[in-house]
Image (spheres, coloured by chain):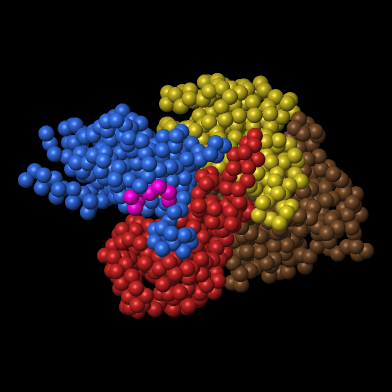
Chain colours: A blue, B brown, C yellow, D red
Amino acid sequence: MTAILPRETLIFTIARLLDGVKLVAVGAASPVPAAGAMLRRALDDGRRTVRLSVLGSVEHNFFTNGSAELFDCAGQGRLDAFFLGGGQIDGQANVNLVGVGDYPQTQVRWPGSFGSAYLYFTVPKVILFREEHTPRVLVEKVDFISAPGVSPPGVYRPGGPVALLTSKGLFRFDSGRPGFTLESVHPGHDAAEIAAATGFAYETPAIVPETPLPDPATLTLLRGRVLDELAETYPAFAAEWRRDLAALAA
Amino acid sequence: MTAILPRETLIFTIARLLDGVKLVAVGAASPVPAAGAMLRRALDDGRRTVRLSVLGSVEHNFFTNGSAELFDCAGQGRLDAFFLGGGQIDGQANVNLVGVGDYPQTQVRWPGSFGSAYLYFTVPKVILFREEHTPRVLVEKVDFISAPGVSPPGVYRPGGPVALLTSKGLFRFDSGRPGFTLESVHPGHDAAEIAAATGFAYETPAIVPETPLPDPATLTLLRGRVLDELAETYPAFAAEWRRDLAALAA
Amino acid sequence: MNADLRAMASRIRPGMRVALPVDYAGVSMAMTRPMIAHGAGDLHLICVPTGGLQVDQLVGAGLVRTVETSAVSLGEAGGAPRFNQAVKDGTIRLRDATCPAIHAGLMAAQKGSPFMPMRGLIGTDVLRHRDDWQVIDNPFAGGGDPVVLIPAIHPDVAIFHAPMADRSGNVWIGRRRELAAMAYASAETLVTVERIVEHNLLADEATAAGTLPALYVTAVAEAPRGAWPYGLWGEYATDTDELLRYARAARTAEGFAKYMAGEASA
Amino acid sequence: MNADLRAMASRIRPGMRVALPVDYAGVSMAMTRPMIAHGAGDLHLICVPTGGLQVDQLVGAGLVRTVETSAVSLGEAGGAPRFNQAVKDGTIRLRDATCPAIHAGLMAAQKGSPFMPMRGLIGTDVLRHRDDWQVIDNPFAGGGDPVVLIPAIHPDVAIFHAPMADRSGNVWIGRRRELAAMAYASAETLVTVERIVEHNLLADEATAAGTLPALYVTAVAEAPRGAWPYGLWGEYATDTDELLRYARAARTAEGFAKYMAGEASA
């Protein structure tokens, strides 16, 4: 069996999560989500048009109405999927992009909420993606709610989180409960390790499956067309990926 | 003394009313207001930039954000002057651009209110310009208020009417009273004729002066540069003006 | 009749809200006869922000239930005869507006907001007759300061004409950004163009600046001189003689029917 | 230092609200040192909708009282060191927002409306800390349905960099329409450009489509590579090495001072 790189598992998982989307946007410095979207587009080729917008990119940005257009698209219901990271993410899927400590004089300051306080409400499929899987990031309660995981009845909320993907595993989010359920663990990790690394409570099925890996055809697409496309926008990331592939083959 | 054409008196009067403006917009089929604005621009040449936008024109329209930009400009306080006609205008400076009779099934239907219900409120210097001066047009009370001449205290109203110019004379509007005062009569007309032709009450000073006429230098500008500029956008109007000038000279 | 245009017209279903641009912005006159041939009626026309020949013809053909507009006229050719007759006869429902209110309603839809506030309007009969608009006191003022709220306008379909599109469905609209605004607000957008070009309009920044992305475009069909008798900016001027010919003919229902039965020719 | 840039910077007065664009839209880095040399402080920066190097340098130079923004960072070069330090020290006032709220506030100013409604935000700490925003029940809903109202943002001055301007002061902004939005909303607009061209940008429809008219432009100055170390779309790429060099240097106040004292060189 072919060895699969950890980042290939992440990219393939994102592509699976994006099944059915027509328009997906990713942030400027987000090569893994971008690659996932590119793989989704490649998989759907000839069957469905999948559009991808990379914010801040000249090449991979078909918007022509300034930086407001992404948010307008979301408001119109045209944006199907988006990614959010977060300095902290808690068990209610609340996201903190602002800082640690008492606001405003936080002792650690992150950049800020960006568009999260809007997109989390309006984009049907928000994928929380944060590679670092530690109790520092996945906390019981965020210090600042940039965007809440759920809203009370009566609040306009067509969008929200569907999943949390880290370097160790994949959680699904149930907005009814609300809370996360561990869906799968990536190769090389296990449920106990994830429990120790997660600062919030979540549900775990009796048997936690391994995260599905790409089949050979998908892997060919991923290491061919997708890697080539990605290299235009994320040359450093693509070069490192290629080096790792060369090392695998050696 | 040089003979002055009636339309030249109107154009010169408009140019006088536009003293001090930086941006003026005129409707698509408004050659007299456009000529007045062009004369204002010519008179201010080298002292102040006067910008003119002719709606719907490709040549004389510097807007680049679609047909909403004019209204945005007005909202920003950048539009100093605008012209309104009106199927009916009453003594409170209410304007009716919709129709005669009971709305909606009016027996006479005019095109509609266009932007009047906004621009009348936001443009500091709105000039009511209607050549026809009859009791049919200048009525006691309009059948439909497309835009009101005055607003009660507490209503946001930086703009409004300053004057009403017809083929017979010029009225000033006093929003405090509110009402019109006859300011001057054009050559060939008199106050009694105007009284008979006006359907609303207004104030008349003891002595009504004649509307000022352009001096020779202004007339040269008007029949030279302004007429040339106007011919680009209103060729038929300019040609007729030139024919009338030729007849004067004969 | 062009099959592409017929196919586009067939997307229109009875009762739809149809957004149409102002005379000088790019009216798809080429779509008017296919729409009439298709026959979907009970339409709610939204003029962005005013209407003209196309609106008059659709009204004359009996396809229109409601006209939401700031004005309808034939410009230099005078009043819109079929529209004016329908008003007199009470056969259409009027939603008289003012230009920026139409823009505000579309902007609300573009932003995904339920409404937009707008200055002006207070004390007008335009406002008095719009039971779908609301007035609130500006919450940011100390008290008083009434302001009108215009609810979002969500057209089912926008229809317009533009100079060019590319093979991907990107449409060059230049500085006529109300066409983009219509498309953003509408569920579907049908576009006729003078020509289809082989290069991608988004490939360089110069043309990209005036391009509506394919994301918003449902279908495109080639229709040379498709705005005629209206003009198209940068392409050709309005044929005022033809507008006058129409205005004369359409004074009566019979004259209108005869005019429409004649072949359109540029 | 370029005299034109100094003259433009001298228009800035203490306490002004200054709108600055996002990293990739055309930051007038060329204006940063002239602004610092001019020394007008107590500024209220409005990042449209996020800030970066320029904001960090103005904060580091002590000119900033308030930062209204959706984020401040150096992108690939990491956090904004002087901004982050100022937050920690409590020496600047934060008005944390979210991108579309900044756009909504500017749009309200563009439209001459007192506010714009915006979805989202309910239940966030962003909203909780903004006492200048309001929540009302959507008057068009049967009841409930809270919606946030963002008051108009009226910057005193907008400052950005663009590829070109003409002799009349028209500026080509391409598809970076947030630059136009900033200018519409602002009382004054100061623009640096790569080059000044001799032809009128409004003379043909192709360039007109991406042009901000001179009406909105207070002053223009030529500043080749004026976005550096940021890139300018269609012109040059971001100099990430320089951003990294700054990020390292500006970890301390001393390092920042030393960096700023060095000559800027492309």
**Is residue C170 visible from the viewing direction of this image?**
no
User: Exactly how many numbered labels are in the figure?
Assistant: 0
In the rendered image, residue B245, in percent from the top left (x then y), is placed at 69, 57
- Magenta region, mostly helix, strand or loop? loop
Q: Nearer the viewer, residue B132 or B64?
A: B64
**Residue displayed at 62% across by 26% down:** C64
Q: Nearer the viewer, residue B224 or A237?
A: A237
**Residue displayed at 76% across by 46% down:** C123
Horizontally, residue A62 falls left or right of residue D19, namely left
Q: Quadrant of residue B225?
A: bottom right
**Residue displayed at 80% across by 33% down:** B102
Q: Quadrant of residue D146?
A: top right
Residue positioned most to the left: A250
**Is residue C113 visible from the viewing direction of this image?**
yes
Tell me if residue B159 is in the magenta stretch. Answer: no
In this rendering, the answer to whether A207 lies above or below A235 is above
**Residue displayed at 61% across by 23% down:** C42
In the rendered image, residue A175, in percent from the top left (x then y), is placed at 44, 36
Q: Which residues are magenta?
A: A135-142
Horizontally, residue D151 falls left or right of residue C134, namely left
In this rendering, the answer to whether D246 lies above or below A128 is below
In the rendered image, residue D121, in percent from the top left (x then y), is placed at 52, 47
In the rendered image, residue D154, in percent from the top left (x then y), is placed at 57, 61
